[in-house]
Image (cartoon, rainbow, N blue to C red):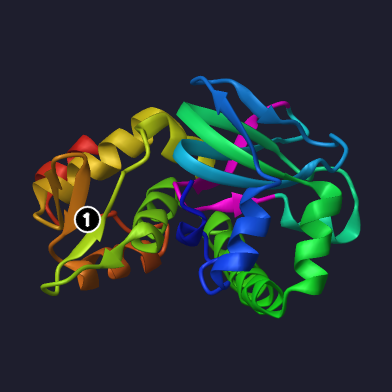
Amino acid sequence: MDLRKFSIFAQLPDDQLREVAAVVRLKQYERREVVCRKNDPAEGLYLLFSGRLQVMDVAEDGQEVGLNLFNPGSFFGELSVIDDRPRSAHIVAIEPSLIGIVPQSAARDLFYRLPGTAEAMMRHIAGLVRTLTDFRVLLALPSAFQRVYALLRQLSKPMPGGIIVIQNVPKQHELAIMVNTSRETVSRAIAQLIHEGIVEKDNGRLIVRRPERLGLLAQRPSGEKPAASTTAGNASK
């Protein structure tokens, strides 16, 4: 059980890390299995060791809305640990996942007693607020194509060697839920980017070959065509 892969525990000395490991309960979840539901009582801090999860909510019209994706090394449930309020969203496994759970009382004790964990948690929450702000701006974009482009830009990360990559690209229906559009629209948008050489598929990831162009497309007013080429423009209609 490698707890140092989680940022809140990465700097803890070995004796404190063993203390955390002693209270972690491991549980396996299958694909599409619900890890926790919105308004569930606070159970503790969840640690994702392997697999992938999606944070989801349901809009007033009954439509599912994807809010975030969790990859190995992610943790969640921290807000409920701090304020003891119920869960604020549904969490669903989108592939088989191994999760560790630090029970509520033990997690609160760690947050308030270990300075290293407390500092890491403050940094994490600050990053979470920034991410949620960016996501709210993304959802306000008027064009579905813009929202897809903006989400892909958010998911892009620089890698050694100077290339920009989207690792572990979510499936098209997962992307569609995250930006409140259809899977078909996501498919057309990505096909258009590939056609223009802006992104390139490579073994389950996307390489962003023209990041500046991707950024411009994400900012394009909704009344304009989403790309310059006639072929791609016709394909998007």
Residue 18: give x, y in percent of width and height: 60, 57
Q: Nearer the viewer, residue 41 or 223?
A: 41
From the top left corner, tell me how far across and down residue 123 is, in percent: 62, 77
Whether residue 69 appears in magenta in the rendering, the answer is: yes
Could you tell me what secondary structure mostly forms the magenta stretch? strand
Q: Quadrant of residue 17?
A: bottom right
Residue for point 55% across, 25% down: 28
| Residue beneath the point at 59% across and 52% down | 75
Whether residue 100 is visible = yes
What's the magenta region?
A: 62-76
Does 18 sit left or right of 97 as displayed?
right
Which residue is tagged 1?
A: 227
Q: Residue at 61% across / 61% down in the picture?
A: 136
Quadrant assignment, res 14: bottom right
- Vertical relation: 86 (above or below) 164: above
Image location (x, y in percent) of residue 231 = 10, 42
